[in-house]
Every structure is written in C-alpha cells, then in structure tokens.
Image (cartoon, rainbow, N blue to C red):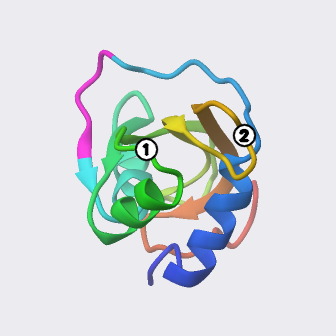
Amino acid sequence: MKFFHRSNCMRSLFVALSLSQSWALATDVPRLPVSEVSPLLRQALQSSDGTANGILVGELAQAIGLRFQSPSPIHIDVRTERRYVQAGCARLHVLFRHDGVLLPGAADARGQSIEFGIDYCLTGEPPGSRQ
C-alpha cells in the first residue's frame, strides 16, 4: 500500500508547504533517501528511539522543487508520539521541511514546513484500536 497517491500528494504538499509552521528540524542526523514517506514510518516504528529521518528524492521531489523554484532538499522527520497495544503500531508525528520555497505571489523565498500525526502499523494499515 502506498502512503501517498502522486496527484493528491502534489496538491496536499502545495497547500501544506504554504503554511509555515516551526518544529525543531534535526539537521545533524543521517538521512535515508526515500521516494515516499512509508519507509521512514516503518523505520520509526522499528527503531529503539522511535525516530527516523530522510530526504525526499526522485520524481516527486523534483516536481516539488520545480513547482516551488527551490533546489533545496526536502527533509522528512518522523518521531513516535505513543505506541499502541497492537504490536508494530503507533501514533507517529511527521514533519516535512523545504528551504528556499518561493510561493506564488511572494517576493522572497523562505523555508516552509508541514507537520501532521498518523496512526500507522508495520503492515502499512492503521491500527485496529488506539489503545
């Protein structure tokens, strides 16, 4: 199961990147190159500290970079907010960060971010319960 459908993802990221929200971005950590976010969600679920960090690569990253006129990498940070009783399932907090974004009508480029929570399991499905 893919986490993002490409056409919906572009629309969602356009809206989302237009909202500037701050969250401490881990810049001094190793980042896994990913073409979609699901490998990072699984990595966070399996890691001892409940985190995963990546850089979006591939067609989607190129399309977003072209749309927002920014060659900067798109960083993705995932952290576990809480683990559920169901094995391999948790509430995850996801942050996308892209520097140098030029929004339509804006005079200057600046960093943009979006963050959201998701209930996710290693199977790629949501948990059966939030307990």
Q: Is residue 25 above or below residue 131?
A: above
Kind of residue sitting beneath label 2:
Ala
Residue sitting at 34 percent across and 38 percent down?
47
Q: Is residue 33 above or below residue 47?
A: below
Q: Is residue 10 left or right of residue 46?
A: right
Q: Is residue 5 above or below residue 74?
A: below
Q: Position of residue 41 (x, y in %)?
A: 44, 54
- Stretch of the chain drawn in magenta: 28-32
Q: Is residue 99 left or right of residue 30?
A: right
Q: Which quarter shows the C terminus?
A: bottom right
Quick check: is 131 in the magenta stretch?
no
Label 1 element class: loop
Q: Position of residue 59 (x, y in %)?
A: 31, 71
Q: Main secondary structure of the magenta part?
A: loop
Q: Position of residue 92 (x, y in %)?
A: 60, 46
Q: Is residue 62 left or right of residue 70?
A: left
The image's mark for residue 106 is 2
Q: CA distance from mark 2 to mark 1?
A: 14 Å
Residue 129 lies in quadrant: bottom right
Q: Neighbour class for label 2 at 10 Å: few (<14), some, many (≥20)? A: few
The image's mark for residue 70 is 1
Residue sitting at 45 percent across and 35 percent down?
50
Q: Which quarter shows the N terminus?
A: bottom left
Q: Position of residue 90 (x, y in %)?
A: 59, 51
Q: Neighbour class for label 1 at 10 Å: few (<14), some, many (≥20)? A: some
